[in-house]
Image (tube, rainbow, N blue to C red):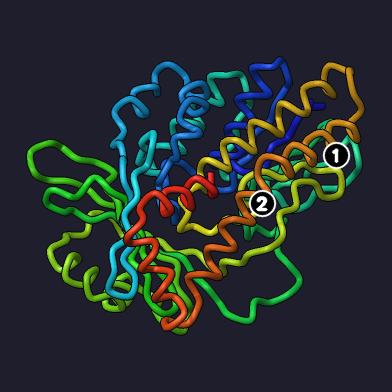
């Protein structure tokens, strides 16, 4: 009997495993894939989570954060305009290939039992819980679902009216700018930022796009949708094979379901352009584990731990989803209606920076 079974070995799941294990819980962390691996992600870690990430990483992996490329500004390319905003303090750019592997190893170092290539098929019970996997059955007093937005455990019954997909790859670029650049076009956007700069004029950039399936399905097609991005990408050399994910669906955040705590994208999928997905995953995973520690120590009931998590999640994270949703609707206004708003944003960087802070 484990105290806690965590499903999903991404940032949310590993943050929960590390936090719970260090708090004395007997933890089993299950991941259906195998590390290291590429994931469709902007690979942007906002400043609000850098301290938490540093605390989660085991000592052999702290250099990953110390050596990460810092991103002090953002640029938005839309309707022929360029909106700029400072990012204070600067964010960090860390490839998921490296981040996920370091957090997984840190969870093992913290004392969690970690198993890869373990696909969870079903969860039953209400405490204790019975978790059936592709390689056996396990029991636990509590479960955290951090399996992502579209695993077999989280599929919504409704189909999306418009299918959105994500696609990303790494490219070599000479002297990439120290900014996260968002190129918007009708039917999607593409984010570009450096993830490695050697200092000798060469660098690696991550290009990650969210696009309607009827608009584009490859990065080459995405690049062709924005004139400035097309010109910039002509000089790139591919460094990784593209990876894709679909469908991408926005739902009302749900931090608790059937007695199970949900963290990361399993709880709520934030608009990728705000760049807070990794941060929300780390913070929600750690918070879920913290709320359960009182239950493991027999200070509160499981129902109380769930209620505490739900209340804290609503207070800390739901406003971020609301703000990002409003900005998404603003960006989808007809071009004629966007024009005066973009003029204000372009001429008033402080207002643009304020909008960025609303999504943190």
On the question of residue 213 being in view, the answer is: yes
Q: Which residue is mark 1?
A: 129
State the image coordinates of residue 256 (x, y, percent, origin top left): 80, 46
In this rendered view, identify the residue nearer to me: 141 or 360: 360
Which SS class for mark 2? Answer: helix
- Please name the residue shown 57% across and 45% down the image: 117
Query: In the orientation shown, which residue stands out farthest toward the left?
Result: 200
In this rendered view, identify the residue nearer to me: 123 or 92: 92
On the question of residue 38 being in view, the answer is: no
In space, the residues marked 2 and 1 are separated at their CA atoms by 18 Å
Q: Which residue is mark 2?
A: 266
Q: Is residue 46 left or right of residue 203?
A: right
In this rendered view, identify the residue nearer to me: 83 or 65: 83
Residue 312, compared with residue 326, is above or below; it is: above
Quadrant of the image occupied by residue 18: top right
- Please name the residue shown 24% across and 45% down the image: 178
Q: Residues within 10 Å of mark 2 (few under 14, many from 20)?
A: many
Q: Is residue 303 left or right of residue 216?
A: right
Q: Residues within 10 Å of mark 1 (few under 14, many from 20)?
A: many
In this rendered view, identify the residue nearer to me: 313 or 99: 313
Quadrant of the image occupied by residue 243: bottom left
Which SS class for mark 1? Answer: strand
């Amino acid at each position: 009997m484990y105290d806690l079974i965590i499903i999903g070995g991404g940032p949310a799941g590993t943050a929960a495993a590390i936090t719970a294990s260090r708090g004395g819980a007997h933890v089993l962390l299950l991941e259906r894939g195998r590390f290291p691996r590429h994931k469709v992600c902007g690979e942007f870690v906002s400043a609000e989570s850098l301290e938490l990430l540093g605390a989660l990483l085991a000592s052999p992996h702290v250099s990953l954060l110390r050596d990460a490329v810092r991103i002090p500004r953002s640029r938005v390319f839309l309707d022929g305009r360029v909106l700029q905003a400072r990012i204070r303090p600067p964010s960090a750019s860390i490839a998921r290939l490296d981040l996920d592997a370091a957090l997984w190893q840190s969870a093992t170092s913290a004392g969690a039992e970690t198993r890869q290539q373990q696909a969870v098929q079903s969860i039953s019970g209400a405490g204790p819980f019975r978790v059936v996997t592709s390689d056996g059955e396990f029991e636990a007093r509590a479960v955290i679902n951090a399996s992502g937005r579209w695993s077999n455990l989280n599929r919504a019954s409704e189909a999306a009216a418009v299918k959105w997909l994500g696609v990303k790859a790494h490219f070599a670029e000479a002297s990439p700018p120290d900014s996260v650049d968002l190129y918007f076009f009708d039917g999607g956007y593409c984010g570009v930022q450096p993830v490695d700069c050697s200092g000798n004029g060469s660098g690696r950039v991550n290009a990650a796009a969210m696009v309607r399936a009827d608009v584009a399905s490859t990065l080459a097609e995405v690049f062709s949708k924005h004139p400035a991005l097309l010109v910039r990408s002509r000089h790139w050399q591919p460094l990784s094979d593209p990876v894709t994910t679909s469908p991408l669906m926005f739902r009302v955040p749900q931090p608790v379901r059937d007695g199970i705590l949900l963290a990361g994208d399993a709880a709520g999928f934030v608009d990728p352009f705000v760049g807070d997905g990794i941060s929300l995953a780390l913070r929600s995973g750690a918070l879920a584990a913290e709320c359960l520690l009182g239950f493991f120590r027999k200070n509160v009931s499981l129902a109380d731990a769930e209620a505490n998590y739900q209340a804290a999640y609503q207070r800390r994270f739901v406003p971020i989803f609301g703000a990002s949703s409003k900005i998404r609707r603003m960006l989808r206004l007809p071009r004629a209606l966007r024009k005066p708003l973009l003029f204000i944003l372009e001429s008033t960087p402080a207002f643009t920076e304020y909008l960025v802070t609303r999504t943190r």
